[in-house]
Amino acid sequence: MRLRWISYVLLSVAAAYYIYLPLPRAVGDPWKLMLLDALFRGFIHVCDMAEALGVCHSVHMLNTLVSSVEVIEPRSSPTVHVTDSTLGGVATRVFQPIGGETLKRGVVYFHGGGWALGSGRMRSYDLLCRKMAEDLDAVVMSVDYRLAPEVVFPGQYQDALAASRAVLSAAVLQRYSLDPHRLCVSGDSAGGNLAAAVAQEIGSDKNASVQFKAQALIYPVLQSLDFHTPSYQQNHNVPILYRHLMARFWLQYLGADPSLSPLLLANNHSSLDQPSITPHTRSKLNWTSLLPDARRKHYRPIVKVTGSREVVEKVPGLVDVRAAPLLSERGILGRTPRAYVMTCEFDVLRDDGLMYARRLEEAGVTVTSDHYEDGFHGCMVFAFWPVQSTVGQRSLENYIHWLDQNL
């Protein structure tokens, strides 16, 4: 009996030690965030161990674990008809509101997950898109682009573009009774990256007879040249998206050797002696001029004079605007539609979004910047039971309200 009690105490202490993380006081729902992060970290550790033992690729196992818990079959309701279909050859879950207006608004949505994880068929995204369809009386198309490591850049971007072009086609507009003047492209995290890249390409396409009216980017990842922006420095150890994990996702997406991660984390890949990174390119992510004092705080740029010049040669996607939309020219940005950019204070990607919003405004685009002082990466999809957070519910309501007012 005593041995059982001692074992219980030791296991409880070990679990508490694994779960507890010192978080900034202003983070919303800290214990829920810690529990979710502990679960995610546990999955990652198990999957990395499986890869080290030669069982399978860690991403494959992680996706299998997540899918077994989260992926659900399409379920229609009295208010929304849900089907699994394809758009431009890309798997897509479509949410069609029943009744309402004859011509519907439309939202193309790309899920997050570091271009390697997740699915539009996951419960959290299913609930998100279902609510959007109900509240907006809009057809929501959740695109299941292909994932790394089987598919790497530009594969995910090409899938997102193909699905988007299909939505803008006469055949799909007619099939789903879509209003061609009330369409939006949107996504969160890596999906926000794809949405921004698609908005740039479609906006610059002079042959496109139908254009998106809006772009809505939720804590988007937009550049991989500076892993020491103030938000990366401030939040490098804040869950759920750690700085080292973001570098890992980038390398997977770009089909690069994971051993390059330390070079990215030290900013060796963007040193001043890189011939392919010009001063003009650097100005597009110069946060000392693009961010306000309140976000720069006491942080200083980490710029290496000399570094690893071969990295950009091996991984050209680091400076490809299709992968890093923040690096696009002002003229390209100016041809994109009105924008909504959500950012969270406790997110390594905060400054990516803030810099992009600033550059869009400078290019003449109407921008709504929606910042959450208690927000963390991924918070908006944590708006539903049993993992809902107060900041997740607020951010989702405001996001849908903006869509309602701007579509």
Image: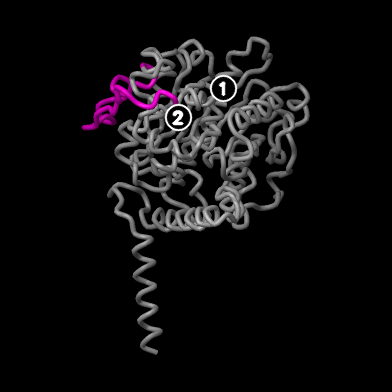
Relative height, residue 251 to residue 45 (above, below)? above
Residue depicted at x 49% and y 41%: 396
Q: Position of residue 98 (x, y in %)?
A: 71, 41
Q: Which residue is rendered at x = 74% and y = 36% of the image? A: 86
- The amino acid pointed to by label 1 is Ala
57 relative position to 171: left or right: left
Task: Give the extent of the magenta segment.
Answer: 283-310
Amino acid type, label 2:
Val
Q: Does dot 2 land on a helix, a strand or a loop? A: strand
Residue topped by disc 1 = 199
Q: Is residue 277 visible?
A: yes
Q: Which mark is residue 341?
A: 2
In the image, 298: left or right of 337?
A: left
Q: Please state the total of marks drawn on the protein image.
A: 2
Q: The C terminus is located in which quarter?
A: top right
Please check the rendered image and state whether residue 295 is part of the magenta-colored stretch, yes or no.
Answer: yes
Quick one: quadrant of the N terminus?
A: bottom left
Q: Is residue 142 visible?
A: no
